[in-house]
Amino acid sequence: MHYIIGIDGGGTKTNCIVTDLEGKILYECSSGASNFLVQEMEKVSETIFGLIEKCKNHLNFSYPNIKIILLGTSGAGRKNDSKRLEKVFTEYSTHRGVTFNCFKVESDAVIALEGAFPGKPGCILIAGTGSILFCKDNQGRTHRVGGFGKLLGDEGGGYSIGKKGLKVISKELDGRSDISIILKLSAKKFGINSPEKLIEEVYINKMEISAVAPIVLKAAEQGDKESLKIIDEESEELVLHILAMIKKVGKPALNVALVGGLINHDNIYSRTLRKKMILEIPGVNIKEPEYTPAMGAILMAKKILSSKNL
């Protein structure tokens, strides 16, 4: 029996699906982050190899039985980077005495788009650690807005929200702003209770900035003024992504699926965003994704196998 492995590599979690050649799901598992924009490619390769090994052991098959592995991860929209990760992973596997039939790397946005709207036009708005909007038109062409990374963009994503939350903390610790619930919650979770501790966590311990985003959302749920301001600003940035896409594709009505840990389930941020989309973009239709991004990777892998007659 032969297998297909589809992997959705995120900034905090990596999801993996194993199917037969028809796409029937046989096993699912997950592990930690595998985003090569924030980790070394060697570390990402270790995470991916570990997941494949876990699948192999659970289903009791040999590595040659894997027909194709397709990984979707942040940053892979740039061809040079995706090819480099393919090369690093291949070298990592070879050093462990394993050669895979086919290992492909695609953008996490592309696999999410394929999963949400398989074979159909539609858009996915992703807001996890970062943010990006991808759209597939009636001709199957893809268009993008955003996705410039944490230094230049990613507005509306966890990093941007977390960074603003940390700025609120720094001002409060200095006495430059009113009291915010964000500091209280951060003190409890991260032990941040002084300027020195904040600097230590951010610059020395290299804390994950996006990990502060859930604290901002929790504080906003409790009516915290500063947090509600952040939620309003960042959700508006995501609305601007959609408005820009409407101009780009010249289509006033769009089907949009919300993807990513910040907006694909019920919380104050996703509710605020949905409300803004309905009020500010009359032509938008919010749709549930048909399949998960990991399953989107499976669907793309099947297309590759079919095109190559493998």
Image (spheres, rainbow, N blue to C red):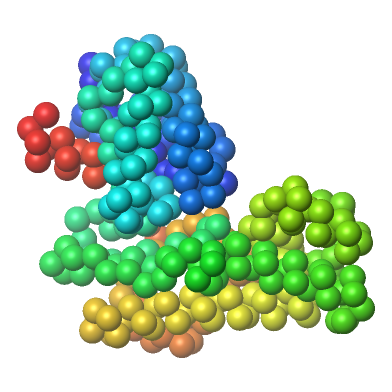
Residue 109, image x, y percentages: 37, 57
Quadrant for residue 306, please give it: top left
Which residue does the image show at 44% across and 14% down from the upper left?
A: 57
Residue 304, image x, y percentages: 17, 40
Between 169 and 238, the one nearer to me in the picture: 169
Number of numbered markers: 0
Do we see residue 269 in this rendering?
yes
Quadrant for residue 65, please give it: top left
Residue 64, image x, y percentages: 26, 16
Q: Is residue 84 left or right of residue 175?
A: left
| Above/below status of 164 relative to 276 | above
Which residue does the image show at 37% across and 34% down from the upper left?
A: 88
Residue 230, image x, y percentages: 67, 76
The quarter of the rendered structure image containing the C terminus is top left
| Above/below status of 15 relative to 288 | above
Which residue does the image show at 47% across and 46% down from the upper left?
A: 36
Which residue does the image show at 23% across and 25% down from the upper left?
A: 101
